[in-house]
Image (cartoon, rainbow, N blue to C red):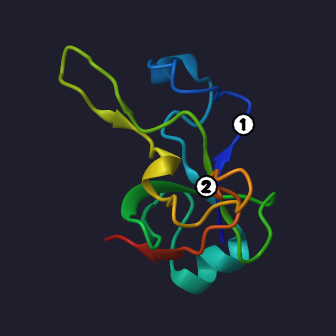
Amino acid sequence: MLSAGERRSFTANTIIRDSSWRKRDADGALRVSSEDAAACGVVDGGVALISTRRGSAQVSVEVSPMMQRGHVSLPNGMGLDEPTAAGSPRAGVAPNELTSSDDRDWIAGTPWHKSVPARLEPIG
């Protein structure tokens, strides 16, 4: 299950467009448990493909003891193009690109971000 929009120490929201301000995790790595990383063949610091019913994205991976087996997590406030002298690289993944308004709270109508079925595969 994907938890999209995790609050982390150095993420806030999409107003922070300069990843150098984040003292840690500038790429907004996908966090995964060591058991799940071993089972699907991804490694700490590696690159993986995360896929949901809505879409797929290439992510950097952080194997984390904070994650429970069967769950992965992306931070909020990522996925923006950062204009630089060398071009406009994208920093991280925008969680909304992986979540769907088809899966939402039936009263408020807000998309679910904390329990999105997802598949993780190594790249390379």
Residue 59, x across and y down, in percent: 44, 55
Residue 103, x across and y down, in percent: 58, 66
Residue 11, x across and y down, in percent: 64, 29
Per the image, the residue denoted by label 1 is 8
Reply above or below: 13 against 121.
above
Alpha carbon separation for disc pair 1 and 2: 21 Å
Q: Which residue extends farthest bottom? A: 39
- Quadrant, the N terminus: bottom right
**Which residue is painted at 54% across and 73% down in the image?**
118
Q: Residues within 10 Å of mark 2 (few under 14, many from 20)?
A: some
Residue toward you, 53 or 77 = 53
Is disc 2 placed on a helix, strand or loop? loop
Q: Which amino acid lies under the numbered mark 2 shown in the image of this protein?
A: Pro
**Which residue is painted at 55% across and 33% down in the image?**
77
Q: Which amino acid lies under the numbered mark 1 shown in the image of this protein?
A: Arg
Q: Which residue extends farthest front? A: 107
Per the image, the residue denoted by label 2 is 111
